[in-house]
Image (cartoon, rainbow, N blue to C red):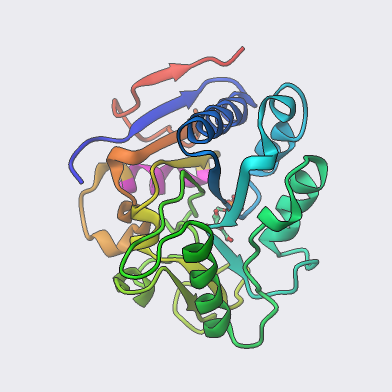
Amino acid sequence: MSAAPEIVVGARPGSVHERAARRFASAAAAAIAARGRFAVALAGGSTPRPLYERLAAPPHRDAIDWARVDVFWGDERCVPPDHPDSNHRLAREALLDRVPVPAGRIHRIEGEDPDPDRAARRYEAELRRVLDAPPPGVPRLDLALLGLGEDGHTASLFPGSPALAVDDRLVVAVRASEAGVGPPVVDRITLTPPALAAARAALFLVVGEAKAEAVRATLERSGESGRWPARTVDPAAATWLLDAAAAGRLEGLASAAGEAP
Ligand code: 6PG
């Protein structure tokens, strides 16, 4: 966990989402060439919507071999799949309903299950089955798309959460009653640090001034680690795509002020 992450700053509105779409497409092409499939975990929240919409439109839609894409989620809110807060609903509306990904390759977290622990265990089993990693192996996603909350959370790993210390599960339930969960304050189901750490690559997509302090604190790696959950992702595997506002407090850490055409 020593190498520095790649940090890319998009200088123009929209350029960060275009860069993310290109990274997604090139990661898909590389994984399919190497292993015959692309296993990706999608992020929730509002930030990735423009990315998903770009992926669903030319040129990216036509460049990606959707028949070989396995879609997972990094986390889900415990709501029905058609609920406005559902991460699955967001991805379906913005992307999955618009591209030819086979239904059998969409691996949804069942947020509607009244027993989130049971749903988490089922999702862990699904990850192991699809990615052919029975215990004690750890399934390797090709790409984990991730966001960052103003409080520093990523997926549904919130600051100080017991989920951050889990080392023997790939997926766990996080209760709404835990301090610091949300918004929305609902039970959640999340990949754990070991599941995220096994990903071949992680792509953080973060925009807006409100996230600038969380970006700085996470990337500077000073202070208590449990306060900044995104630090659980291996920096050497991580790329951070930031807009200028989110990168505003980095002071020299950003490697490029990139312009997308
Ligand atoms: C979730 C997410 C979460 C999200 C951040 C950023 O389900 O809540 O997966 O980790 O990525 O909260 O959310 P915004 O993009 O809405 O700011």
Question: Eyeballing the image, is 128 above or below 18?
Answer: below
Question: Eyeballing the image, is 255 above or below 100?
Answer: above
Start-end of magenta stretch: 210-218
Residue 81 spot, x, y in % from top left: 75, 68
Residue 236 spot, x, y in % from top left: 28, 38
Q: Is any atom of residue 156 visible in this view?
A: no
Question: In the drawing, does residue 160 fall left or right of residue 92?
Answer: left
Question: In the drawing, does residue 178 fall left or right of residue 7?
Answer: right
Residue at x 62% of width, y 44% of height: 69
Nearer-the-camera pick, 178 or 232: 232
Q: Is residue 220 magenta?
A: no
Q: Residue furthest bottom?
A: 115
Where's ligand 1: which quadrant? bottom right
Q: Is any atom of residue 147 visible in this view?
A: yes
| Quadrant of the rendered image containing residue 219 | top left
Q: Residue furthest top?
A: 261
Q: Residue furthest left?
A: 2
Residue 195 spot, x, y in % from top left: 39, 60
* Quarter that holds the C terminus: top right
| Quadrant of the rendered image containing residue 63 | top right
Residue 59 spot, x, y in % from top left: 72, 21
Residue at x 70% of width, y 74% of height: 79
Residue at x 34% of width, y 51% of height: 233
| Quadrant of the rendered image containing residue 25 | top right
Q: Is residue 215 magenta?
A: yes
Question: Eyeballing the image, is 184 above or below 203?
Answer: below
Residue at x 62% of width, y 51% of height: 71
How many numbered markers are drawn? 0
Q: Main secondary structure of the magenta part?
A: helix
Nearer-the-camera pick, 142 or 132: 132
